[in-house]
Image (spheres, grey):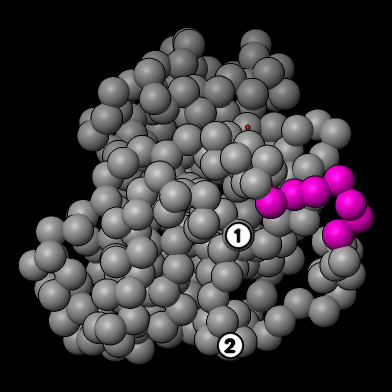
Amino acid sequence: MVTLKAPAKINLFLKIFNRRDDGYHNLVSLLQMVGLYDILTFQDIPAGIRFDVKGMSSDRSNLVVAAAELLRKEAGPYRLKGVAISLIKQIPISAGLGGGSSDAAATLIGLNRLWSLRWPKERLARMGEKLGSDVPFFFYGPTAWVSGRGEMVEPVDAVLQKWAVLVNPGLPISTAWVYERFSKMKLTRKRPKITMTSFNYKKPDVVRVIEKPCNDLEEVTMGIAPSLRAIKKDMGLFGGKGALMSGSGPTIFALFDTYHLAKMAALEIRKKKEGEVWVARVLRRSPFS
Ligand code: C5P
């Protein structure tokens, strides 16, 4: 049996450059794993893929089954036994925290171990790309710049604040809708002044990123969820650094130097009943490594 903790991610920075012919958007983002986890276990069974989930309805988690099927297909399904996968869901869904992508990465890593395939992580990451744009990051975390669709990953060794407070107001957001709306509102047909390639050559220092947080998608999501502005402001008032929406939202996070400061801020924010609040470690080591 293999058990894995699949961590959530936050986007410390997210800039979008252009819409591509395949409908996706070229972006540059700085991703960071945080200590809020889904738990997956993988157990040998004679044949087939069995899946059960606690914490959400099972039809939402088909990325795990898709990942297992993809791996079986690539390995030649007749060589392998079956697997029973169970998932305990703790990362909120459609929240901008990459829970589904992390579960998919965990499934590829878990089955690679269970079935003793010994495939390198580069190969698994390339398979992960087919399952979702954020999946490859989870093979190279805890901290990395990603670009392209999200599939080009460049790990960085950053010394960040040790704790994060996350607030999820609990309105599920469709990532596809947010990107579509951003495209219509913000992207013109003119060539952008800065391209993804030129930005990639001169990426800001991670310290600067925290001082000047930027997520291009904030405006879109905040347009339909105005309460996010108040949450973000409160995070700053209670001492959080780099307060920002994660991914396409709606989760808002901020960073804190100590557990005590993070806990105090979380207490104050909980009083305001703005959403579900977590204090999570900013991971210095990937739970997958
Ligand atoms: O890759 P993933 O399935 O997670 O993406 C969900 C949706 O978000 C895509 O269908 C697409 O509409 C949008 N997206 C995008 N550009 C990206 C990543 C995601 O347009 N780089």
Going from N to C along the chain, the mark reached first, 1 or 2, is 2
Displayed quadrant of residue 73:
top right
Where does residue 243 sit, x and y in percent of width and height?
41, 74
Of the four image quadrants, the one with ligand 1 is top right
Query: Is residue 37 in sight in this rendering?
Result: no
Q: Main secondary structure of the magenta part?
A: loop
Residue 172 left/right relative to 126:
left
> What secondary structure is found at the residue carrying circle 1?
loop
User: Residue 188 magenta-drawn?
Assistant: yes
Residue 21 left/right relative to 226:
right
Give the amino acid type for the residue marked by disc 2 in the picture. Val
Residue at label 1? 216
Disc number placed over residue 207 in the picture, else none:
2
Where does residue 214 sit, x and y in percent of width and height?
57, 70
> What secondary structure is found at the residue carrying circle 2?
helix
- Disc 1 under 8 Å from ligand 1? The reply is no
Say which residue appears at 52% left-offset and 50% top-offset: 220
Say which residue appears at 35% left-offset and 54% top-offset: 226
